[in-house]
Image (tube, helix red, strand yellow):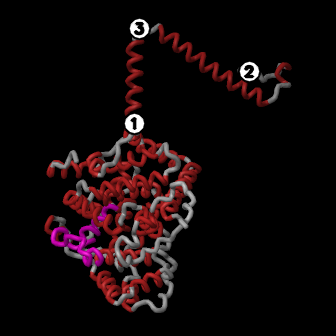
Amino acid sequence: MPYTHETMDAMRLMGDELADATVAALFERGEVGKFNTLMRYFTTVGQELPDGLPDVAREYLHTTAAPPDWVDWGEMEKARLFFIDNNVHISTALAFASMPACYVVPHVARLLSATHALEYPSRRMAETGQFTVYLMQPDAFEAGSRFVPAAQKVRLLHASIRHHMRREGRWDEAALGTPICQEDMIGGQMMFSIQVLDALHRLGIHMSTDGAESYFYAWRVVGAMLGISPEHAPADAAAGRRFSDLYMTRHMGPSEEGALLTRRLIELYEEVVPGTVLDPVVAALIRYLMGDTCADWLQVPRTGWDTAVKASPALLGILERIEDRSPLGAWALDRLGHLTTHLELSSLTRGRIMQYAIPERLKGEYGVTSTAPRVHPWTPPPPTPT
Amino acid sequence: MARTGDGGETRDVGEPLLVAAGVADLALDRMGAALRQAKSLLGRSDLADLARDGRDDLRERGRLALRRYGRTPECHMEVLARRVASRTGQGDA
């Protein structure tokens, strides 16, 4: 479909009817707590739904249990291989390009701040990371998979944020349309797909057209499972480019919330990078991937590493040559990539399973208390006053 | 080359030592050839031109190597951001 200001404006009014209706019914009947508790035990495809699950939830889970019938499984397998080949680079792009891209859209940054009290992006990063790892398992769509239930829960999570933002009057619907509308959901889909491919290119990673298109396709499938209407979603990377460019230029700009979220993201990654010497690389990499204008909008600090990081494509090029020439080198780099991805994810999740529960209220469950950095030295609590 | 012939003086020397000596001899041989080449070079009148050609060759090789390893593609997000900044005057925010 053609992407113009008119078609994009129309998408700002569309939410996700099925998930919105499910969440509205759960709240109306006071069944959210029960639903969340029971859903903790529903994590894999093929598992029986827990007894006592509200009917409306049962119906939703039944309707959304299968991936869309148009999925080309050959493409999905190619996407999985592409992900395996490029896992570290993709994780890097998601962390240093996709996350800041969300923050450079001011109304998205405001929504993230309002919902998560997200001065601390670690929870979202952990959820996204785990989601992507589930997605790229060989059995992602088969019995035993954790991906489909995760997608079903994330879709309801988005619907519940829509519900809260509207009910609490925190969203200027006249100016911005529906919270987490179709345009924003597809915008997010583009940040995880075409913009990741842009970042890989910027890092000098060589990709085949087949690989890049299949990676894009996998996110098209994921988008459909998360409530994006397939008729509006870009069909291929070329259409993705058009949507993404128009979406970004319609909305991108500086905001206080965007700068704050970026600062927290940088701190979070500095915690993950071992030691302190390499800490400035985090900011430098964001600046390199986002460009100076966006980095300035997000108040990404300038560091002495800004120039050095520009050599990263050269470094990655050399690593790629080693990979091509020596099976032992390829094996070693693959193991290193695997370890890095898992180290990143485990630092973020800290061993938790991310439950994607529906928040009963905003801020409370997403508050800073549960996600505050735990790197500060512990000191014994002072004696209880007598 | 070190002799491995019938001469009694080399018969009791171990195989590895002979191989090592062979390698050293070969290296010296090459070095000798290089020195002879350098000597004839010094006698040439177009030495300056040769040196310049050599430097040009090295520079070209360097350029190719940099292009192979160090090409930095344009930052797509920067292109979009500049477009927005020029439209809204947000460039120095």
Residue A114 position, x and y percent, is: 31, 67
Identify the amino acid type marked 3: Ser
Q: Which mark is residue B2?
A: 2
* Residue corresponding to mark 1: B66
Residue range in magenta is A163-191
**Mark 3–mark 2 distance (CA, rounded to whole Å):** 38 Å
Quarter of the picture holding the N terminus of chain A: bottom left
Nearest to the observer: residue B51 or residue A116: A116
Q: Residues within 10 Å of mark 1 (few under 14, many from 20)?
A: few
Corner quadrant of residue A259: bottom left
- In the image: residue A157, left or right of residue B7: left
Q: Is residue A337 left or right of residue B76?
A: right
Image quadrant assignment for residue A131: bottom left
Give the amino acid at mark 2: Ala
- Picture disc at residue B45: 3
Q: Residues within 10 Å of mark 2 (few under 14, many from 20)?
A: some
Ranked by sequence position, the earlier of labels 1 and 3 is 3
In the rendered image, which quarter is residue A265 located in?
Answer: bottom left
